[in-house]
Image: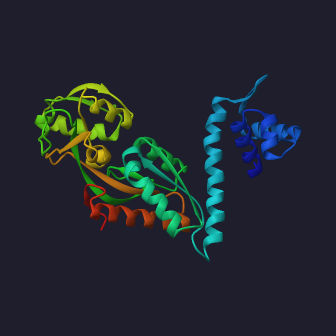
Amino acid sequence: MELRQLRYFIGVAEAGSLLKASARLHVAQPALGQQIAALEDEVGARLFERTSRGMALTDAGRTFLDHAKVVLADVERARAAVSASAGEPRGEVVIGLPTTAALAATVPIVRACRERLPQVRLKVIEGYSGFVREWLTAGRLDLAILYGDAPVATLALQPLVEERLALITAAAESHRPGPIALVDVARHPLVLPGREHGLRRIVDDACAAAGLTLDVVAEIDSLPNVKRVVEAGIGRTILPAGAVAEEVAAGRLTASTITDASMLRRVMLARSVARPASLAATAVAALTVDLIRGMVAAGAWPGRWIGD
């Protein structure tokens, strides 16, 4: 199996046809088809369904696509590591951010990378924390921000911030912002993410330990939509205060800290232990830690710094 076959396979998968992939890859269509057929013979499975409309991935093809991307990414990391070993950090670095972290950190990280690491091509991927963890483990990311400090054999976790969760309410409601106990939170109608979400697990575990049952009127896995529903007065939600800092400053939402000790979330910087970090990835990791430490000190990221 050759690297060019993997590149051809990814090109056809993304283009959806041999004709389009041939133009993009600057490879003759018959030669491209022969390479795809040879690759299928080698892996022992049909990777594409051939139709009159083009080439569609089979189930085996979709599985192979994930692995092919990881292999080529590792090759690129190795090339970048060698070329950068004697000079300044350079090459692509892919960082994964959960949605709430992305709200606070994306702009500062991108700006600082442009200023301090001009030879680094930063790629930011946003998603639910569970997906970000899977992408990092699978090799699609160089580093990521994750929630929770439970040990993971395949990841190196560096603590950064401890966030206290808050009850988020529409500013137009009569609720006065201020510290609130979980038992009082349970009296309000709530809009929360699904049970597979990391934040929801923290809330459910805390309520189970306290013998409380929440009044969950809707489950929504989109943070922007959760905030819109709360602003509309349909229900309240539970989030770290930093996730609604813009709306609170604009007078649309209020945040009341939940005082129970269990209503905390830890923010971690994570890297895979299975792959050596490039000089560029190490530099971006250090820059990210430095930025978040400064944001916590300035109050731009509400929480307690635990990184030292």
The answer to whether 286 appears left or right of 296 in the picture is right
Give above or below for 56 relative to 139: above
Q: Position of residue 63 (x, y in %)?
A: 61, 37
Q: Nearer the viewer, residue 128 or 148?
A: 128
Residue 246 appears in the picture as rendered = yes
Tally the numbered discs: 0
Q: Nearer the viewer, residue 46 or 136?
A: 136
Q: Position of residue 109 (x, y in %)?
A: 45, 59
Q: Which residue is located at x 13 percent, y 29 percent? A: 187
Image quadrant of residue 48? top right
Q: Position of residue 56 (x, y in %)?
A: 70, 29
Give above or below for 68 relative to 37: below
Q: Position of residue 182 (x, y in %)?
A: 14, 39
Residue 195 appears in the picture as rendered = no
Q: Nearer the viewer, residue 123 or 44?
A: 123
* Quadrant housing the C terminus: bottom left
The answer to whether 149 appears left or right of 210 in the picture is right
